[in-house]
Amino acid sequence: MLLITCPYCQETLPEAEFVYAGEAHIARPEDPSQVSDEAWRDFLFIRTNPKGPHFERWRHLHGCGRFFNAVRDTVSDRFLTTYKAGEPKPDLATLTGEAK
């Protein structure tokens, strides 16, 4: 069972309380009508699939209902951190203990 901490409620709860909402920090084009079909396709469907830390978006569905971001290690399935939507990406070197 995955345990996830909501950065708004400050509660650590089972993953059944939350819903995955895709990759985090994907910026929508400012004027979609000016984007090529290929670029629009990439925006809608192409995502990274890293082995290791991955920035994800989650929603606390059965709690506050708010969206937040998380860094989850896709190898160990462990959450490294969660943070409020709109906050910048945390430094991966600090989270993983690697030197820069």
Image: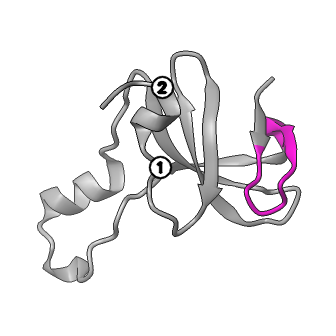
23 left or right, relative to 3: left
In this view, the residue in front, 98 or 37, is 98
Q: Could you tell me residue 44's position as x and y percent?
A: 34, 56
- Image height of 31 relative to 86, above or below: below
Q: Could you tell me residue 78's position as x and y percent?
A: 64, 25
| Residue in the picture at 40% in, 24% down | 98
Q: Magenta segment: does it hold 14? A: yes
69 left or right, relative to 44: right
Q: Magenta segment: does it hold 64? A: no
In the image, the segment drawn in magenta is 5-16
Quadrant holding the N terminus: top right
Q: Could you tell me residue 97's position as x and y percent?
A: 48, 26
Q: Could you tell me residue 51's position as x and y percent?
A: 40, 21
In this view, the residue in front, 86 or 93, is 93
Q: Looking at the image, do the residues carrying marks 2 and 1 touch, with CB atoms under 8 Å apart?
A: no
- What crowding class fits label 2: few (fewer than 14 Cα within 10 Å), some (14-19), or many (20 or more)? few
Q: Residue furthest top?
A: 76
Quickly name the residue at label 2: 97
Quickly name the residue at label 1: 90
Task: Kindly report which numbered mark, 2 or 1, lies closer to the viewer in this rendering.
Answer: 2
| Residue in the picture at 51% in, 48% down | 22
Q: Which mark is residue 4?
A: none
Residues at marks 2 and 1, CA–CA distance in whole angstroms = 13 Å
Q: Tell me the kind of residue under disc 2.
A: Gly
Colour scheme employed for the rendering of this structure: one colour
Counting residues from the start of the chain, the first of labels 2 and 1 encountered is 1
In this view, the residue in front, 100 or 84, is 100
Q: Tell me the kind of residue under disc 1.
A: Pro
Label 2, secondary structure: give it: loop
Q: Residue furthest front?
A: 99
